[in-house]
Amino acid sequence: MGWKDELKRFKDQIDQKFTEASKPESQGPQPPPVPARPAELYWQPQFHPDVPVGNEWDAKLGNGPDGWGNQELQHYTGDSANVFHTPDGRLVIRAIANNAAPTPELRFTSARLVSRKALGRDRGVLTAVILSPCATGIWPAFWLLPQEPFSWPTDGEIDIAETWNGDHVNRSCLHWGFHHEPQNHRVMTTTIGDMHARPVRYDFVWDQPNGQPGQGKMVWYINNTPVMKHTPKGNRPMKDMTVLLNVAMGGNVCEGQRPADGHYDMVIQSLFVASDPEHGGWSRFEADWASPNTPLGNTY
């Protein structure tokens, strides 16, 4: 073999190695953006097996008035069968369906957690990375309500992540009126076709100068993309809001559908409240707020 042929063969080998090194990883469910270290961390519950869930959260119990107002089927418990920390540092809310159980209290069980701490700030960022169960009759939610006691709905409700009946659609919502008052609701839907197979990052950013109810700005983000914006509504300031995590079953929202026997896990990989938005800070927030591409949401 001549020296020119030898040189060509050597170059071809180098090119092949470079090409292989440049190939993308095999396709499949991709993880959400990894939260960077926030400028200042206000609150981050510890998801460790040796830390009781009750250190950071109050567990609501029972079936509530009229099935928590929606004729839901589940009976909430604080049992370790329904809510627990995993060895790898996750918080799991597990809804369990057993249609053959002898009593309603045993047929459908789940957990509903309310943070012991309120947001406590006039501005900030609430972030969670969540793997949501998607199935008929299942309704996981990550949302905000004022500290108790409060008057629903006029004191305000903010929904950051919720999906039902396995439709793989997230609802970002703001409520400050009753169901017959469509002008007092805002909803924006976002289809996430693989939300059952990969964790999704949700950020909720608010700025309410001087803590004045009914004033300020809010932007909802999914995987760093703004999906909705609105002015805070309701009679309570943002700093009074608490964080809720739950998995409901059946009821009006699920159109009366019942889940099949089995368990349905909502897995919270991380959750924290921080001082500043990532990926551009408050200037990015102001730009997203001002952008006509960030919708205000729809009425009912």
Image (tube, rainbow, N blue to C red):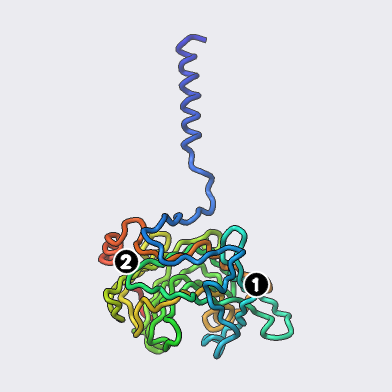
- Name the amino acid type tagged 2: Thr
Q: How many marks?
A: 2
- Give the SS element for disc 2: loop
Q: Residue at x 36, y 76 (%)?
A: 238
Question: Along the line of sight, which residue is nearer the eye, 5 or 147?
Answer: 147
Residue at mark 2 to residue at mark 1: CA–CA distance: 41 Å
Where residue 46 sits in the image (x, y, percent)? 53, 64
Up-down: is 176 above or below 206?
below
Q: Which residue corresponds to mark 2?
A: 294
Q: Residue at x 40, y 73 (%)?
A: 119
Return the residue found at the far top.
Answer: 2
- Name the amino acid type tagged 1: Ser
Q: Which residue corresponds to mark 1?
A: 80
Where residue 164 sits in the image (x, y, percent)? 53, 73
The answer to whether residue 254 is left or right of residue 272 is: right
Q: Residue at x 44, y 76 (%)?
A: 242
Number of the label disc, if any, that sits on residue 178:
none
Question: Along the line of sight, which residue is nearer the eye, 179 or 268?
Answer: 268
